[in-house]
Amino acid sequence: MNETLKRTISGAIYVILLLSLILYSTESFFVLFGVFLLIAVFEFCNLIQLNKIYALIISSIIYFIFYKTNFKQNELFTNETGHNLTLAALIITLIVSIKCLLFLFEQKNTAPNLFSKYVYLIGYIILPFVFITKIPFGEKGYNPKIIISIFILIWTNDTFAFIVGKSIGKNKLFEKVSPKKTIEGFIGGVLFAVIASYIISRYYFEPKEYYFKKSVVIWMTIAIIVGVFGTIGDLVESKFKRIAGVKDSGNIMPGHGGILDRLDSVIFVAPVIFLFYQILNYVS
């Protein structure tokens, strides 16, 4: 099969599956990202040479615990306990994100030690998936439009970063980790994501759901977060792959690589967007 056709078909299946299960129900949404998490953990363990059994058990337990905290009424957690767990998880994730930045700028391409491997597993892989599942939940419950919009912004940023970089890109962004990324492509991706955010806030959300002017500012800010932190997430995963000596994290998606390759941006973006939402709620 032609490589372009293979890439198109597998990409279309991924997008259809993602959108369908996000829209269908909260249960299908959690199942989808639970499966994505397990695959991503498996792929990450291959990259850093970590015991898969322990990693999969840890990820399953953490995901289940936070799955229960997404609902106000359940038999395991009170609202206060759930809030404290989420706050602790956010702090851990943000600290590990800083560690990922330091790792990205390290001159030596050496594999992390065993302790750091588990730190990255929890703070870079598992907990960001938790925050992906928390983002669509607000005062009115589950709103799939929010997480779909974030994916649209990520896809827009990635697509136009590639197009602009391919067309006019001359200055390398981070050549030692990702030789094809350019500063021009990065700026182009962010600009088009901001344009997409205006369209989303204007046409995708009903005026009665969000006050329009406020919504535009919020979504443009999210677009900038997506452009900046999504690119960093992509670079961090590229650093892990470079140390492992592989091109892709897996081969589950022909022409696209692994699940981690598809979600490397969103797992770095999700905790920051969740923090942004908390700041908005506090201010309001």
Image (tube, rainbow, N blue to C red):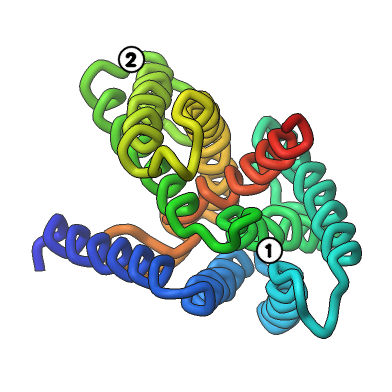
Mark 1 vs mark 2: in front: 1
The residue lying at 47 percent from left, 24 percent from top is 213
Residue under numbered circle 2: 170
Task: Describe residue 145's horizontal placement relative to residue 81 as left or right.
Answer: left
Query: Would you say the residues marked 1 and 2 are in contact, meaning their CB atoms lie under 8 Å apart?
Result: no
Q: Residues within 10 Å of mark 1 (few under 14, many from 20)?
A: many
Residue 162, percent across and down?
Answer: 30, 33
Q: What secondary structure is found at the residue carrying circle 2?
A: loop
Q: Of the residues shown, which amino acid type is indicated by label 2?
A: Lys
Q: Residues within 10 Å of mark 2 (few under 14, many from 20)?
A: some
The residue lying at 72 percent from left, 39 percent from top is 281
- Count the marks: 2
Residue under numbered circle 1: 126
Task: Describe residue 255's horizontal placement relative to residue 71 as left or right.
Answer: left
Instruction: Tell which of 90 and 24 is nearer to you.
Output: 24
On residue 101, the disc is: none
- The C terminus lies in quadrant: top right
Task: Describe residue 272's horizontal placement relative to residue 96 as left or right.
Answer: left
